[in-house]
Image (cartoon, helix red, strand yellow):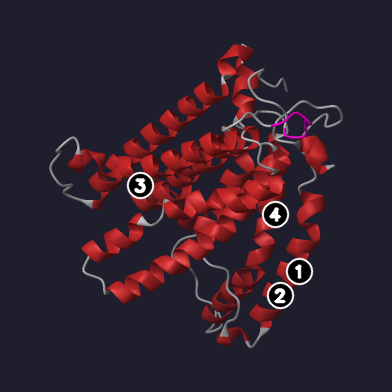
Amino acid sequence: MATPASFHHPASPQPAIPGAAAAAVAACAAMAVSYVAVLYAPTALLRLPPPTSLRVFLHRRFLCAAFSSSASLLATASLLRVWSIGDSSVVLAVFGIRRDHLLQAVAIPLLLTSLVYAGSFVARLWLLANSCGGGYEEPEIGWAQRLAHRIRASVGDVMVWRNCVVAPITEELVFRACMVPLLLCGGFKIYNIIFLSPVFFSLAHLNHLFELHQQGRNFTRSLLIVGVQLGYTVIFGWYAVFLFTRTGNIVSPIVAHIFCNIMGLPVFSSPQTRGVASVAFLAGSLSFFWLLFPATSPKLYNSRIDQCSCWHGYCRWS
């Protein structure tokens, strides 16, 4: 990948442009604030009437999130001056939007992430086995019909679209695809970016405290709920940035984001499983950390990493 002339490769011995780090942090903070602020634009700025249903409410938010992420991509492209590259595929690759090695970018991070949920899988299988333990009953409809019914219900469920499509894609585009290149080109080291950029991701979830307060929730309870959410988003943010900088493909953190949204918090223990879920969680977590670097080796996701000029720093991970 060719590096734009206005920014040096993070492995380059050249000094960072004066003020580049501060500008990168300011740009990331502005994107985080705007991503949340735009969600309230329909009623606060456009003076639209309050939404009459959850579907209308979320449809408005979908449009706002799409607008915000598109604006962030354009702003990042302007700040990095990637338009001078000319090749559209290279411009998109700056944001990790690539078609090559797509199977690896989807399958390997998905399997890696699933290891943390070994306890969750055991708990669900245990519950399923117990629910079927009362004896076999001839089902009214076959499993294929039930599956088709669930798919149709999911396609029409606005919350499914929120959790599995809109939120993962728009958030990863803004908080990973835009912010990571900005911070890299601001002179930050990769390890610093992994731990710094999730701060912006977590701050973008502080609006949940305001929304819970508006719903009449107790402030202390709301603070506890949001605190847990912020802790979870920080941990996931570390992992998402790690995936992005290792693979160079934005699809990897998007897939992990969708999977985590579907699964929720990992099950650490379950009294019903008599400790089996805890053992599975521990074994899965140990396997996750053991495979974390081998499964995300840049060689699996890139045709060439020697003498590369990419600013995602693939050559620095080898």
Amino acid beneath label 4: Leu
- Depicted 213 relative to depicted 150: above or below: below
- Residue identifier under label 1: 286
Q: Closer to the N terminus: mark 4 or mark 1?
A: 4
Q: Nearer the viewer, mark 4 or mark 2?
A: 2
Amino acid beneath label 1: Leu
**Marks 4,3: beta carbons within 8 A:** no
Q: Closer to the N terminus: mark 4 or mark 2?
A: 4
Query: Which sits in the foreground, 269 or 201?
Result: 201
- Rendered image: mark on residue 54: none
Q: Nearer the viewer, mark 3 or mark 1?
A: 1
- Rendered image: mark on residue 156: 3
- Depicted 81 relative to depicted 45: above or below: above
Q: Position of residue 142 (x, y in %)?
A: 50, 59
Give the quarter of the figure containing the N terminus.
top right
Residue at (28% x, 64% y) in the render:
212
Q: Nearer the viewer, mark 4 or mark 3?
A: 4
Gap between marks 4 and 1, in whole Å? 14 Å
Binning the other alpha carbons within 10 Å of mark 4 as few (below 14), some (14 to 19) or many (20 upward) gives few
Gap between marks 4 and 2, in whole Å? 16 Å
Q: Position of residue 98 (x, y in %)?
A: 64, 29
Q: Secondary structure at mark 1?
A: helix
Q: Closer to the N terminus: mark 4 or mark 3?
A: 4
- Residue identifier under label 4: 111
Residue at (78% x, 50% y) in the render:
295
- Residue identifier under label 2: 282
The residue segment tinted magenta is 10-15
Gap between marks 3 and 1, in whole Å? 38 Å
Q: Secondary structure at mark 3?
A: loop
